[in-house]
Amino acid sequence: MGGRRPQRADARTNRERILNVAEEVFGKGGQSASTEEVARLANVGIATVFRHFPTKAALLEAVLVQRFDRLREQAETLFHAPDPGAAFFDFFSHLVADAAGKIAIAEALFEAGGDHDGDAAQASDGLRRAVGALLQHAQRVGAVRDDVELPEVYALLVATSRASARAHLEEEVRDRMLTIIFDGLAPLRNARAQLKT
């Protein structure tokens, strides 16, 4: 009977600890962070890291998958929120605030020769679909204008996230930027009413 044997409990614990530490280390240090630092902070030997993740790229991809999956799961918990508009805008804000670490990890993966069509890309698509569902829920209740679709909203999300991360915007500036974007996503009748006042 083929197939992989299930991991022992201590091996699973080591793997989870390595992933969590790696997310923090590479999220802060980007491409300059090392697997040796991950091993040290996870309190495991470098051989243990490489037993679970044979290359730096494999580790970074697993970290990115974990991060995208966690964000997707957070979005999915908001699918039945009592206020779909607030759920959408709050999650958009959360993604922008979370962007710097994700971008650092993604760039480190690229530098390490990671696969652009691998598991991380699939996990990213899952997050994108979850954002699309939140957008649709918000549109159904009239919180977001109905003439926008996911491609342009996601492009706004990505551009805002990159701008916030690259420019190291202060929280107050980032919040004002998001207010401008959210005003643009508001239903047209509200925007027109604001122009008349």
Image (spheres, helix red, strand yellow):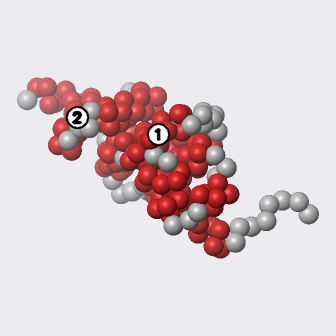
Q: Which residue is mark 2?
A: 177
Q: How many neighbours does mark 2 have within 10 angstroms: few (below 14), some (14-19), or many (20 or more)? A: some
Residue 42 numbered mark, or none: none
Q: Position of residue 11 (x, y in %)?
A: 65, 68
Residue 31 numbered mark, or none: 1
- Residue drawn at (36%, 42%) of the image: 100
Q: Position of residue 20 (x, y in %)?
A: 49, 59
Q: Earlier in the sequence, mark 2 or mark 1?
A: 1
Name the one closer to the observer, 106 or 87.
Answer: 106
Of the 4 image quadrants, the one containing the N terminus is: bottom right
Q: Secondary structure at mark 1?
A: helix
For the residues labelled 2 and 1, the Cα–Cα distance comes to 28 Å
Q: How many neighbours does mark 1 have within 10 angstroms: few (below 14), some (14-19), or many (20 or more)? A: some
| Residue type, mark 2 in image | Met
| Residue type, mark 1 in image | Gln
- Residue drawn at (58%, 49%) of the image: 59
- Residue drawn at (59%, 69%) of the image: 13
Q: Secondary structure at mark 2?
A: helix
Q: Position of residue 136 (x, y in %)?
A: 44, 40
